[in-house]
Image: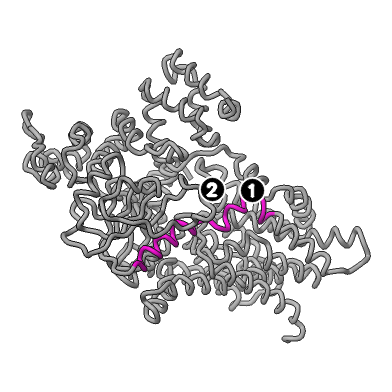
Amino acid sequence: MTRRWPTALPLIALLAACGRSPAPPVPPPCPANLVLPASAPAQGIPVEDTPAGQCLAARASAGDVAAQLRLGDFYRDTPGTMPLIDRRGRQLHWYRMAADKGSPAGAWAAVQLIDINRDIQVPNDALAYLFVAVKAGIPEAGDYLVDQWQDGRIDPGKLYRLRQWLARPGALPEDQRQDIIAGLNAPVDELLEE
Amino acid sequence: MLRRHRALAGIVGVALALRLILASRMTVFHADEVWQYLEPAYGVVTGSWVRAWEFHAGIRGWFVPLVLAAPIAVGQALAPQTQLHLYLVRAVLALASLAVPVAWYDLARPIGRRHALVAAWVGAVWCEVFYFAVRPSAEAIGLTLLFPAMALAQRLRRDPCPRRAVVLGLLLAIGFVVRFHYLPAIVLIALWSLGTGWRRTLGWTVLGGLGGLVLGGLADVVTGHPPLLWIWRSITFNVVEGGSDLFGTQPPWWFVTFQARTWGWATLALVPLALIGARRRPMLLAIALAVIAAHSLIAHKEYRFVLLAITTLVLLAAIGSVDLWDRLTKARALPVLAAIWAGLSLACALTPVFSEYWMQGDVPFMSLVLAGETPGLCGFAMFDQPAHPALAMTMFNRRAPVLLFDGPEAPLQARAMADRFNVIEAPQLEAGKLPAGYRLTGCRGSEYLNVEDRLQCLFVRPGGCRGGVGDFAYQPAIERRGK
């Protein structure tokens, strides 16, 4: 049986490769002094369609987390100046890409963009990104998680895996870990009654 | 023949009536019914559909959408500006699902005629069975395929017949293509069919199975996708990469606790009855447990995922109820048992969990229907909707451009693009943030929703539209949001 494994491995690798799209080639780095123009988006042209933005967008699309975060930050930092651009959508697009590559900063930014309606449960994708940010030790993310739990915005079952992870000593700095555990152990019903 | 089966025919008539009543209503249990099945089916027919992220990721198959495309095509051909296509889809599913009470009858028939009639009756009136009968979802269609497969397997075990074996293989394979997560149940059903004459039937079952897989693969090929590759991609994404965790994780015992809440106090009757029934058909219990066990290993859990297991337990309970009745009394009062089961079903239908389902989806999807039917519609804006995708072309059923605005800058953006649309769907409390000139024409569900819960109100302005949709076209906008 074990002798068959070496011959089976290429087949398994081939099948696994079939499940994924081939990664696009990574374009060359953009100039170090690259400046993204705010004037084009103000006229309804996405910054990704400008010469400087094209370079960065190509890098970001190929998986460069720094480029993804920079594009997300560009749209975040220009509120009220580009009414013809889907600014929230474009921020979310780049931050999510960064988060999907494991960036805690991208995940935390995505949480704040997705979870904007406090009258409903925390959306599942926001919760998943929140877990990424909490596990990376972003203090605000831990506080946010506890606040939403105590506001009754998270189904108890959805914290099952995170609680298991938090129970492991060393998962986070000890004081931070204990704070989150204590916050999550507060009974939601009693908090709501208060 | 007809006389011999008159009672069964009557039960099937009741089943059909319940299903058609439900088919006449706009209810959606889960968003997947719309964006995983109806939308691609509508897209096959009209070329216009909202592509959810699963189709970009290539983790959904095309067999179910192609099947659903047939009634949609008929509806669009006969009355393209109406909702006939939706009624036809539900009616076709309702008719096909009549196979469930008939299969339950067949599965219980060797035990006794009363067992069979009670099983068929429960298959007709049990709320979870007929509620899901009209759902265009993999789990629900799986019932329509796999209960007849169970009945065939039982017959094949006793009476090896090549023709039945081919049909069994076909049903199991199509069941796999529709809901591959039911594989443990499918394997058990196949094993169940192997009686003493298995050498005469196994080859034919495999042949039928290959035929079913070819049909499933062909559906992918004709829509321009590699055959059945989506199954592998789906497993890779959901299990290997943990993608399903994005939709929430639950503890392993969640199915049990949630089902107890769904059945309410009827759980106290159903569980012991199912255990009594399992003594008659242990394989059915094994099938139910296999489905629950397999799904319990995956962190992301939803009630609908184990629908086959839940309804199999209900079938066992129906069989067990006749055994218990016989033990308690000599009276052979089938109408009393039927009434008890109807009462249990009603109790389940009215539990706090299940009662929510009867009106689910009416407000958001009927609002889309009404938006599409607005006279003079030339552009449609979805303003601050609680979740996306919110647009379903299947319901909207018009070719007008659709724009998406959300977040703190939505009012600014909607004003900047005001010429591009003349109908808006928005929360009632957001009326003050809309561009000038709009008047509220109505909020679906306003008779029972508080004003803060009226999220899909329609606002209309007079006049036409100018210009394009710019950066706010619905499809690319939801793709940016990862939807």
Residue B136 relative to residue A57: left or right: right
Residue at 68% across, 62% down: B126
Place of residue B228 in the rendered image (x, y in percent of width and height, measured from the top left): 39, 61
Place of residue B121 in the rendered image (x, y in percent of width and height, measured from the top left): 72, 68
Question: In this picture, which residue range is highlighted in magenta?
Answer: B348-374
Q: Looking at the image, which residue sits at the far top?
A: A175
Please determine whether, in this image, residue B404 is positioned above or below residue A146: below
Secondary-structure class at tag 2: loop
Please determine whether, in this image, residue B316 is positioned above or below residue A177: below
Real-space Cα separation, disc 1 to disc 2, in angstroms: 17 Å
Judging by the rendered image, the residue that carries numbered circle 1 is B352
Q: Circle 2 marks a residue in which chain? A: B
Place of residue A43 in the rendered image (x, y in percent of width and height, measured from the top left): 10, 45
Residue B258 relative to residue B447: left or right: right
Which of these two is toward me, B450 or B261? B450
Please determine whether, in this image, residue B270 is positioned above or below residue A153: below
Residue at 51% across, 32% down: A159
Please determine whether, in this image, residue B457 is positioned above or below residue B20: above
**Crowding near the residue tagged with mark 2, few <14, some 14–19, many ≥20 C-alpha atoms within 10 Å:** some
> Callout 1, which amino acid?
Pro
Circles 1 and 2 in contact, beta carbons < 8 Å: no
Which label belongs to residue B302? 2
Which of these two is toward me, B162 or B249? B249
> Callout 2, which amino acid?
Glu
